[in-house]
Amino acid sequence: MARSSNNIPTVQITLSTTPHVKNLLEAIVKSGLYGKNAAEAAERLVARQLEHLIKEGSLGKLKH
């Protein structure tokens, strides 16, 4: 079954990290829960952490 298209607009950012972090991202991709590559895994982990910070109130009120 094909995935539906993303209705939410996206933007591209550039992220630099260490080889060790990249290797860890590639390792968790193998779990099948974090996307198909290191970039997708990084995006999903960042989104999950931001969601966590919002829920606990650490980010205060966000401006949209």
Image (cartoon, helix red, strand yellow):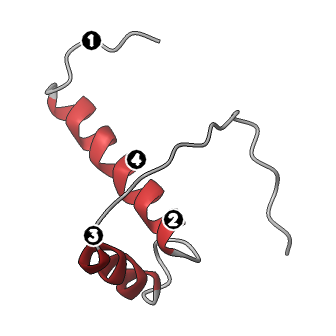
Amino acid type at circle 4 is Ala
The answer for how far apart the CA atoms under marks 4 and 3 are is: 20 Å
For mark 2, give the secondary structure: helix
- Residue 44 is situated, as x and y percent measured from the top left of the image, at 44, 57
Compare marks 1 and 3 and give the one earlier in the sequence. 3
Amino acid type at circle 2 is Ala
Compare marks 3 and 2 and give the one earlier in the sequence. 3
Q: Residues within 10 Å of mark 1 (few under 14, many from 20)?
A: few
Quarter of the image that includes the N terminus: bottom right
Instruction: Evaluate if marks 1 and 2 touch, with contact meaning CB atoms under 8 Å apart.
Output: no
Compare marks 2 and 4 and give the one earlier in the sequence. 2
Q: Is residue 20 above or below residue 49?
A: below
Specify the label residue 61 is tagged with.
Answer: 1
Specify the label residue 16 is tagged with.
Answer: none
- Residue highlighted by disc 2: 39
Q: Is residue 20 above or below residue 7?
A: below
- Residue highlighted by disc 3: 18
Q: Is residue 14 above or below residue 50?
A: below
Residue at 79 percent of width and 64 percent of height: 3
Instruction: Evaluate if marks 1 and 4 touch, with contact meaning CB atoms under 8 Å apart.
Output: no
For mark 3, give the secondary structure: loop
Which residue occupies the foreground of this view, 57 or 63? 63
